[in-house]
Image: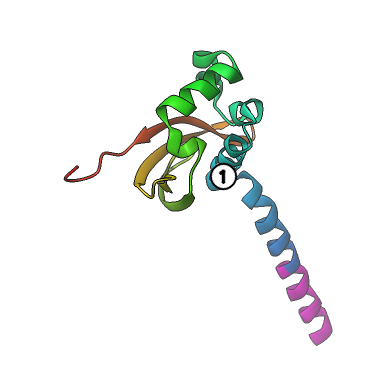
Amino acid sequence: MKNLLISCCFLFLSVGAAAAQTDTKDLPETIIQQQIDAFLADDFDRAFAFASPTIQGVFGSAPRFGAMVKQGYPMVWRPADVRFLNSDGAGELRRQNVLVTDQAGRLHLLEYEMIRSGDSWRINGVRLVPQVGA
């Protein structure tokens, strides 16, 4: 009986650990980091794939999307450091705060709006959060 109980506990822990590993692939933070990695590689097709259908519709193509990011969000295109902060929301909508250090060492607080699209998270917008006193 004791061996059966130990086996059941081990099985439960193994299944829980496996589930936790698969869940991290679809966390909003993971999707954001994958998009940033694509920007670092100048792979705008891959970066565009992480955008929501709405964002894809607005820009129409990966090159146009890439040009917007390079001009409007250079700290995201070429970050020196990326740190994930708090997130909020529930269900199909989340907001993820990300602290990005640019190549000059300046800090930028960005709020990513994440939505569920099918079975994965997609980036539905990024807002630069104004700094207090700036």
Per the picture, the main secondary structure of the magenta-coloured stretch is helix
Is the N terminus in the top left, top right, bottom left or bottom right quadrant?
bottom right
Q: Nearer the viewer, residue 39 or 2?
A: 39
Residue 1 can be seen in this image: no
Residue 8 sits inside the magenta stretch: yes
Where is residue 8 shown, x and y percent of the image? 77, 73
Residue 9 sits inside the magenta stretch: yes
> Which residue corresponds to the image point at 64% horizontal and 51% vertical from the top-left?
23
Q: From what the image shows, is residue 97 above or below residue 50? A: below
Where is residue 56 shown, x and y percent of the image? 55, 19
> Which residue corresponds to the image point at 77% horizontal and 80% vertical from the top-left?
5
Per the image, the residue denoted by label 1 is 33
- Number of labels in the image equals 1
> Which residue corresponds to the image point at 39% horizontal and 46% vertical from the top-left?
104
| Left or right: 2 as drawn, with respect to 98 | right
Q: Secondary structure at mark 1?
A: helix
Q: Residues within 10 Å of mark 1 (few under 14, many from 20)?
A: some
Q: From what the image shows, is residue 120 above or below residue 53? A: below
User: Which residues lie in the magenta part?
Assistant: 1-13
